Structure formats: C-alpha cells, structure tokens
Image (cartoon, rainbow, N blue to C red):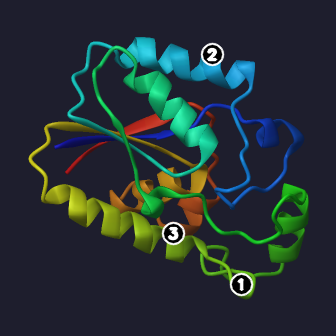
Amino acid sequence: MKVYFMRHGESEYNVVKRINFNPKVEVGLTVKGKDQVKKVAMELFKLRFDAVYSSQFERAKESAKIMAEGRKLKVRGDVRLNEMKYGLEGESAEDYYSVRSDAESLSEFKLEGYESFLDVKSRVYDFLQGLRKKKYARVLVVAHEAVVQAARTLFNEFNDEEAFTTPIKNGQYFMFDM
C-alpha cells in the first residue's frame, strides 16, 4: 500500500501565525491555500486513490475535498489525524516557541493538559495500524504539519527531534510504502 501524507493548504491562521488546535474553531483556507491544493490535485490527478482521509479541522477537510474532486471518493474524517493540541488556542505561534525554548527535548515537550509531538506520533501510529488492515493500494491523508512530521518518523526518514523541527510547507506531500 502506498500512503500519501499531505499538509493542508495555507490557512487564515497560517498567514497571521496563530495556533489553532480546536476543531470547533473554524479556520479555513486562504485563496492561496486553495490554489496550493488545486496545484497538488492536478499533479496527482492520474493516481487512483482508494480512500481519502482527513482530520476534523476545516482547513484539512477543505483541502481533502479539493483533492477528492472528480474522484468519486468520500472524505473520511479521523480524529487521530487532528492537529497537535499545543495549548495557547488563538495565540501567536511565537508564544508557543518561546515557552518551549528551554525544553530539553522538543519532541517530549508539552504544556500541562496538552500534547507532545510523541503523543501525536502515537496517534498517527494507531491510525496506520488500522489502515494496514484495509485492502487499499493507494491512500491519501490530508492533515497537519505535526501529523506529517510524525509520519516521516514512523517511516524512518527522521528521528523525532529532526522531524519535529523540519518544516512542512502548506500543500506539501510525501509518499510512503507500507
């Protein structure tokens, strides 16, 4: 099975560098974000996907719907693909980076009551274990930066610290063989 992990297109909060980890706070794609996803959709259009999965966030669902257009595939939501629960909802991403700047391990750092990168990695691992049981040839997963970073560690491209500090561009995707 080939699994494509893709980060959603540019969102309204990406532009203003704000944190959104609550799926009930609807943060959609910008025009640029929609264009980014349409470009990837054109690039991958000849590939036959058996399923398209998305997080529960508006920006990921919107991106997944663009990717699924013309494919007669329903986008399947999965909570395990949701954005990392950083804390500091609606606050500046700089505030989060500042708070974690003294952490011994970035991949283990978490604000009390929230998630670390390793927690996200565990969710993604669980998702992939369930996916292994399906008889798909090719799957598209549209999610968030930390989710794609976690996939890259699970497929041995990076260690946890490297993956969590290696940015994923909006609309960027990676293919993995399972």
Contact (Cβ within 8 Å) of mark 1 with mark 3: no
Name the side, left or right, on which 143 lies relative to 78. right
> On the picture, is 165 further left or further right than 132?
right
Q: Where is residue 140 in the image (x, y as percent from the top left)?
A: 34, 37
Identify which residue, 116 or 33, lies in the foreground. 33
Q: Which of marks 2 and 1 is in front?
A: 2
Q: Which of marks 1 and 3 is in front?
A: 3
Q: Residues within 10 Å of mark 3 (few under 14, many from 20)?
A: many
Using the rendered image of the protein, determine whether residue 69 is visible from the camera's viewpoint.
yes
Q: Mark 3 points at which residue?
A: 120
- Residue 147, x across and y down, in percent: 51, 56
Given the image, on which type of amino acid does mark 1 rest?
Answer: Glu
Q: Tell me the distance, in whole angstroms, between the alpha carbons under discs 2 and 1.
A: 39 Å
Q: Residue 68 carries which label?
A: none
Residue beneath the point at 74% across and 56% down: 20
Residue beneath label 2, please? Answer: 35
Residue of label 1:
104
x 46%, y 69%: residue: 121
Q: Residues within 10 Å of mark 1 (few under 14, many from 20)?
A: few
User: Which badge, 2 or 1, is on the more N-terminal residue?
Assistant: 2
Q: In which quarter of the image is residue 72?
A: top left
Is 57 in front, or is 103?
Answer: 57
Does residue 121 lie above or below 135 as drawn? below
The answer to whether residue 130 is above or below residue 152 is below
Q: At label 3, which amino acid type do we have?
A: Val
